[in-house]
Amino acid sequence: MSVYFDIRNDAVAVIETDAPETGWIKLTTKQSRLAARYRVEAGKVVDAYPGKTDEEVLAAIEATQAALTTPPAEPTRVITKLAFMNRFTMEELAAIYTAAKTEVMVEVFLDKLKIAEEVNLADAQTIGGLQALAASGLLTEARVQEVLQ
């Protein structure tokens, strides 16, 4: 049996047969049988990975596919403390500071905010702190989501 390139439809397939069809191109003994390494250019078969072994070609293809299927990491959403505080209305801030005088968890949230260098809106502690404010009745869940945006 002989091995041929079938380049119909501008794609490369490697076929082993004794009955080649018109237009198929016979592989030389030096050519790889890995169809994925080839592409069609101007009706000719071209090695897209010259100088690489089949294993290296497969690894490169796998890496490319992984990069395409891996969702990009969510960007860190870091803002200044002032920008964070400005997301609240004056009435909300007054209620939060008033509650901090009697509710320890609210006081802890404000103390952490004071010593923080910045506020990461995607951080679990930030989200949890805002949810605690909502649980205390100081913010609605809708406002928590607005502040986090």
Image (cartoon, grey):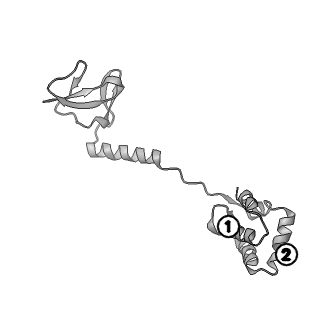
Do we see residue 145 in this rendering?
yes
Residue 35 is labelled as none
Q: Within 10 Å of the Cα at label 1, are there few (<14), some (14-19), or many (20+) other Cα atoms? A: some
| Picture quadrant where residue 95 is located | bottom right
Q: Name the residue under label 2.
A: 98
Q: How many marks?
A: 2
Query: Is residue 120 depicted above or below 53 in this figure?
Result: below
The C terminus sits in image quarter: bottom right
Residue type at mark 1: give it: Thr
As drawn, the residue found furthest toward the top would be 22
Residue type at mark 2: give it: Thr
| Picture quadrant where residue 94 is located | bottom right
Q: Which of marks 2 and 1 is nearer the N terminus?
A: 2
Q: Between 12 and 136, which is closer to the camera in this rendering?
A: 136
Query: Is residue 39 depicted above or below 52 in this figure?
Result: above
Q: Is mark 1 on a helix, strand or loop?
A: helix
Q: Which residue is drawn at the image coordinates 62% and 67% (left, top)?
A: 124
The N terminus sits in image quarter: top left
Residue 106, x across and y down, in percent: 75, 75
Q: Between 142 and 89, which is closer to the camera in this rendering?
A: 142
Spatial CA distance of label 2 from label 1 is 20 Å
Q: Between 76 and 143, which is closer to the camera in this rendering?
A: 143
Q: Is mark 2 on a helix, strand or loop?
A: helix
Q: Name the residue under label 1.
A: 126
Residue 17, x across and y down, in percent: 17, 28
Residue 112, x across and y down, in percent: 71, 74
Residue 126, x across and y down, in percent: 67, 67
Query: Is residue 133 depicted above or below 53 in this figure?
Result: below
Residue 12 placement, left or right of 78: left
Residue 42 placement, left or right of 127: left
